[in-house]
Amino acid sequence: MTAPVRTRFAPSPTGMPQVGNMRTAIFDWLFARHCGGKFILRIEDTDRERIVPGAVETIMEGLRWLGLDWDEGPYFQSERLHLYKEAAERLVREGYAYYCYCSPERLEKMRQEQIARKQPPGYDRTCRNLTARERADYEAAGIKPVIRFRVPDGGKTTFTDTIYGEVTFENNTIDDFVMLKSDGYPTYHLASVVDDHAMKITHVIRGEEWLSSTPRHILLYQALGYEPPQYVHTPLILGPDRSKLSKRHGAKSILEYREEGYLPEAMLNFLVLIGWSLDDKTEIISRDDLIKYFTLERISKTSAVFNIEKLNWMNGVYIRSLNVEDFTMRALPFLEKGLPPEAKRPLDIAYVRRVMPLVQERVKKLTEVPALTKFFFVETLDYPAELLIAKNMTRQNTLHALEVSLKRLSELASFDETVLENLLRPLAEELGLKTGQLFSVLRTAVTGETATPPLFQTMAVLGKDRCLRRISLALEKLRN
RNA sequence: GCCCCCAUCGUCUAGCGGCCUAGGACGCCGGCCUUUCAAGCCGGUAACAUGGAUUCGAAUUCCAUUGGGGGCACCA
């Protein structure tokens, strides 16, 4: 019987949750859910210098937004220091590790020299075989040591990655890395190995940037006498310049996508498709199907560029698939925030419900809703008079069209879509205009825009009074 | 500099020796629909990095080359 699948997402709380990390989290979560296993959240807060207050909460909020629920945690490595210390000291005792008293300054100088000599930078093993006497001297001088792993002198370290297959490193290309820092905190290498073992993690699914430090982890497992987990390195997400996506590209936090009006289900679908595919044609996949069909085997080896154009398209697809009420509720906060101040708040929900269906299929992002519906919510329209004059029309016949329209519309008892259409289509012919011309004039008069939802529906929602008022105003504007 | 990984349309990808005169999607271009804008529908543009080898047969296997990326901290 094989152990139940346990995966973990182990971010460090050093900033906002970036999309690259989130994509990894999605893979971890999906695999756990697919296998009926557990997904664990672990916070790797071992670098006290870089900790950003609030980052943990932001990370969790990002996970929740995407619907990635965790079964255990968050565990905090800062609360488990004794475990790492014990492991490190045990390794020293057993000869797998040693205390190092070299100063950061000396190490930095050494590195510079190595680079200058075009040699691979790495620890020169000065403290590898200190005598008891030398150690005592350093201790007496009050120098706090780090603990370094004693990498075997010869041989190779090989492991099999689920995605990349068998990978081999010569041990002599790996330097004696630090496991425990002088402040008593572990480095990533030690902490993740100790924790992954303690938490019975079966599959370490993480970004490809970790591939080259994996032999260190294997070495650590061997020295500790633990069975290593299955390693699954996932391809990187790249910026437009094809280098690893980072702040440098203006890479955004997952929560910023929420602010920009992306739907979490679209984001999930899009992100999972960077580096994974179901088959040769599926693009839109539901969360349930993702869980049902997700397999590690279909993760690709090649890193991929984050293509915002495709995300926008996909978000539009998801927006259109929402039922109207759902769309309305999701758009509401964006309206509250994005509509100009003169729109009176709180917004009239009943009215919003009538407006939203008119724009649902016209937006790709929820942030576009306010601009597209502004004229429904503000009283004063601001547009140049010339905008009223449609293609191949003159000031004169535009005025005439507006005058006649105003009169006829004012005689209407009902103001619904059908009634309006039945009045206006024949009217265009009567005025000797193309329907497009008349509608264009009225559209501008009534909305101040040239691109809007369908005219009759728009007018019906605006209501008779407001339409007549705006047409009158348009006439004035054109006369002056 | 050293180590590791990767290599199909501009981008995301399918392809795991013959089904490939390489399929899908985004974008782009053209058309249809149409009161504008979208949406929708139809069509088009566009790729196996290069050179060897294996094989009856290679996008698929192997080896070089080239190119790209990642790593080489008391950061993760």
Image (tube, coloured by chain):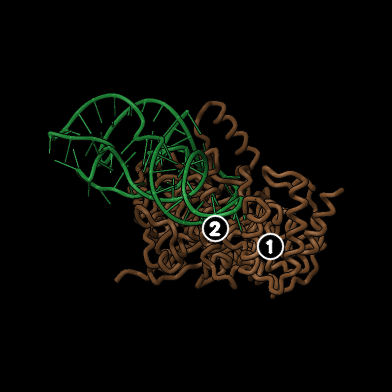
Chain colours: A brown, B green
Secondary structure found at label 2: helix
Give the mark, 2 or 1, whose residue is nearer the N terminus.
Answer: 1
- Rendered residue at 48%/63% (across/down): A8
Please identify the quarter of the rendering in which residue A262 is found: bottom right
Identify the subunit bearing mark 2.
A
Q: Is residue A469 left or right of residue A121?
A: right
- In the drawing, does residue A335 fall left or right of residue B60? right
Rendering coords of residue A297 (x, y %): 34, 56
Name the residue tied to disc 1: A54
The one of A270 and A6 positioned closer to us in this rendering:
A270
- The type of residue carrying mark 2 is Asn
Residue located 63% across and 71% down the image: A329
| Residue sitting at x 81%, y 59% | A472
What residue did someone put label 2 on?
A: A315
Nearest the eye: B32 or A30: B32
Q: Position of residue A30 (x, y in %)?
A: 44, 64
Which sits in the foreground, A306 or A439?
A: A439
Q: Is residue A185 visible?
A: no
For disc 1, the neighbor class at 10 Å (few under 14, some 14 to 19, many from 20) is few
Q: Residue furthest right?
A: A480
Q: Give the amino acid at mark 1.
A: Gly
In-front residue for pair A377/B4: A377
